[in-house]
Amino acid sequence: FNDDPSTQKRFRAGGETPAPRSLSTRAQLYERVFPQYRQPVEVGVFSLDSERAFFNDSRQLRYYVDPGNKPSFNLRDGYRDRFIKRDDGVKERLDHILRWIVANRPKLHSTHTSSSSCTLGVNFVTWRGHLTKLLTTPYETQEGWLLAVSKFRGTLYMSEVETEAARVNRENRTERHEEMMYWGYKFEQYICADDVNGVPDRGGVVNTNEAFCTVVQTRLADHKLLFSGEVDCRDKDPRAPPAPACYVELKTSAEICTPKQRSNFHRYKLLKWWAQSFLPGVPRIVAGFRDHDGVVVSVETFHISKISQLIKNEYNCWKPTVCMNFCSDFLSFVKSVVKEDNPRLVYLFAWEPHRDVTYTVHRDSQYTFLPDWYIKEMAS
Ligand code: 0WD
Ligand code: CA
């Protein structure tokens, strides 16, 4: 933590331990032993249908069908006529997770904590994707982030706010970029079957409203976490290990033709892939490498536990321990800053590349994100 010594002295004279005002993101500061990260446990699932309606079940779960390593997939197929795109201008914040919590409260209510100071029995509730951004922060040089945090009944809720730069990018995507965003979803359709004995329907409609999400509980150092992440598919073998170990993450990436491209893939893309799947305990990624025209030229499996070995030959490469220690220290920073239990009060944590993490405080503002229905429901 960075601390202004004068402030520190002023506060300590009054007997208070001041919260630090900022947090450094320099990677070297986080090169220490790997923090404890408990095996993530799936505590529930939910689905979002073609209209983005919530269901407290696994109706959208799909099954992995091995494509072999040289399939002929054209990812451009269907972009014009069989694609329904989710409206990404609609901000859903934590709403789906909160609906899951309300529907599963008895399952969650901590029987181990005697005190009522932390009703849910966890310190943090968030999306997996938000934690992925935290893990990659010490190595990120392009995009900043904003995270809104409110404390309610002892639990810290953390919800992303779109940065100005991200909004500008989203509103000014090129036609080429829009189409390339479709390719990842099309790849999923070539690989996934709706039924355990079914086959992929490559002629069907791709609808990005549909989602299957896992809800996992785990602990990073002394932070108890509850988060949800979207899962692409599962191993269809009934003897496969229980979730999340049976899940498979699907990815697409540009084919690798030069040593420079391979190095960039290891240094930048594998960092994001590793962080995203390591968090919920998803053990493998199946990647489709595609050419410039959206044709998949090869398919490769990456085991999460082997990724850190794979990158060790890169000069000055990312380290999992830095990612996890930074995340742990950021969560400690949040705990030390967010003291008032009030769902209408938002602490907005902000970060831009080459800067420290800082925060601002907002009462009854545009940033308030815990909905009234949730607050009412939890009060009863
Ligand atoms: O409101 C927000 N700021 C966000 C909401 C940001 C990110 C996600 N979400 C919501 C959506 O409801 C989505 O269904 O979270 C769900 C996914 O959460 P996550 O698993 O925590 O997100 P992340 O790990 O970033 O992405 C997982 C997958 C992506 O797959 P790839 O292979 O591209 O990483 O979820 C999809 C995408 O397929 N996805 C989204 N789907 C809908 N809305 C979004 C999004 N904003 N972002 C990623
Ligand atoms: Ca994916």
Image: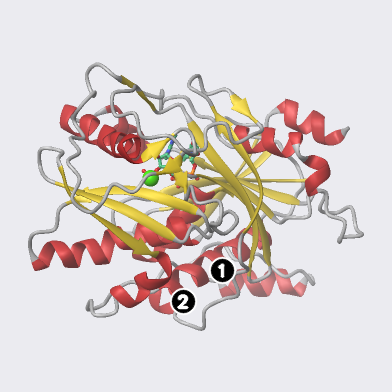
Q: Quick one: label 2 or label 1, which is nearer the N terminus?
A: 2
Q: Amino acid at mark 2?
A: Tyr
Which residue corresponds to the image point at 34% horizontal and 62% vertical from the top-left? 302
Q: Quadrant of residue 115?
A: bottom right
Q: Name the element at disc 2.
A: helix
Residue 153 visible in the picture: no
Depth check: give the residue in front, 45 or 15. 45
- What is the C-alpha distance between the residues marked 2 and 1? 9 Å
Residue 214: image location, x then y, percent: 58, 45
Q: Quadrant of residue 162?
A: top left
The quadrant of the picture showing ligand 2 is top left
Which residue corresponds to the image point at 61% horizontal and 61% vertical from the top-left? 40
Residue 17: image location, x then y, percent: 72, 70
Classed neighbour count for the residue bearing mark 2: other residues with Cα under 10 Å, few (<14), some (14–19), many (≥20): many
Name the residue that disc number 2 marks. Answer: 30
Classed neighbour count for the residue bearing mark 1: other residues with Cα under 10 Å, few (<14), some (14–19), many (≥20): some
Q: Quadrant of residue 366?
A: top right
Residue 189 visible in the picture: yes
**Callout 2–callout 1 Cβ contact below 8 Å:** yes
Q: Indicate the quadrant containing the N terminus: top left, top right, bottom left or bottom right.
A: bottom right
Name the residue that disc number 1 marks. Answer: 329
